[in-house]
């Protein structure tokens, strides 16, 4: 437990009287499974993951075969993309802490869509390949970071572990 290691539970707030005020809101897992919002969230995360992972797996080959770019350009784009996935996770954490989870989702979705649109444009140059890698890298990490934050933001922390267990099945 958090107390065993000298920490306070997530959501802990001490009021003026000095008493703990941990507020765990949200439905139980049984209630969540009956909610259309649960199924919509799962399907949306599944489709988003399929789209992002599909592009991630195919863009190096597409850059070479469809656009005629050198293998070195495609591999550099993959490297840039992977580095920015790591940086993007830090940015998403900052956005989630500073703002609402909806702001993080909007940011990552916009970056991913911009990247995908760049990949769909005819006549990709090496410079455009790198711009794609930056945009898509900053948006692609949402498939791993977003599901946890969306689950807690929509369904609360009351039965988070069980509900996230079900949501994670959609992601994998």
Image (tube, helix red, strand yellow):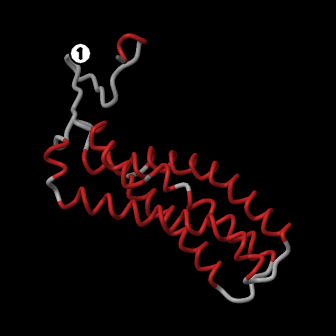
Image coordinates of residue 77 in percent, x first then y, are: 75, 65
Name the residue tied to disc 1.
Answer: 18
Taking 64 as reference, is 34 above or below it?
above
- Occupied quadrant, residue 74: bottom right
The residue drawn where x is 43% and y is 12% is 5
- Which quadrant holds the N terminus? top left
The residue drawn where x is 36% and y is 64% is 44
Query: So how many labels did they put on this image?
Result: 1
Q: Is residue 99 left or right of residue 59?
A: left
Image coordinates of residue 42 in percent, x first then y, are: 32, 58
Q: Please name whichever residue, 40 or 131, is drawn nearer the observer in this view of the structure.
A: 40
Q: Please name whichever residue, 22 or 115, is drawn nearer the observer in this view of the structure.
A: 115
- Occupied quadrant, residue 37: bottom left
How crowded pointer 1 is (Cα within 10 Å; few <14, some 14-19, many 20+) is rated as: few
Q: Please name whichever residue, 149 or 60, is drawn nearer the observer in this view of the structure.
A: 60
Q: Please name whichever residue, 153 or 65, is drawn nearer the observer in this view of the structure.
A: 65
Q: Is residue 153 left or right of residue 16?
A: right
Image coordinates of residue 35 in percent, x first then y, are: 16, 56
Taking 19 as reference, is 127 above or below it?
below
The residue drawn where x is 55% and y is 62% is 53
The residue drawn where x is 41% and y is 66% is 47
Q: Is residue 48 left or right of residue 167?
A: right
Name the secondary structure under disc 1: loop
């Amino acid at each position: 437990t958090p107390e065993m290691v000298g920490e306070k539970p997530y959501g802990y707030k001490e009021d003026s009287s000095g008493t703990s005020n941990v507020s765990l809101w949200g439905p139980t897992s049984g209630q969540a499974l009956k909610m259309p919002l649960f199924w919509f969230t799962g399907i949306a995360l599944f489709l988003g993951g399929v789209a992002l992972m599909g592009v991630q797996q195919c863009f190096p080959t597409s850059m070479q075969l469809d656009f005629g770019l050198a293998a070195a350009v495609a591999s550099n784009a993959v490297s840039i993309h992977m580095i920015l996935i790591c940086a993007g996770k830090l940015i998403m954490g900052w956005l989630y802490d500073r703002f609402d989870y909806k702001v993080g989702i909007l940011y990552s979705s916009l970056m991913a869509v911009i990247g995908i649109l760049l990949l769909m444009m005819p006549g990709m140059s090496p410079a455009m390949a790198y711009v794609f890698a930056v945009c898509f890298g900053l948006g692609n990490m949402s498939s791993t970071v977003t599901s946890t934050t969306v689950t807690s933001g929509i369904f609360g922390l009351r039965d988070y572990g069980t509900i996230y267990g079900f949501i994670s099945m959609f992601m994998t």
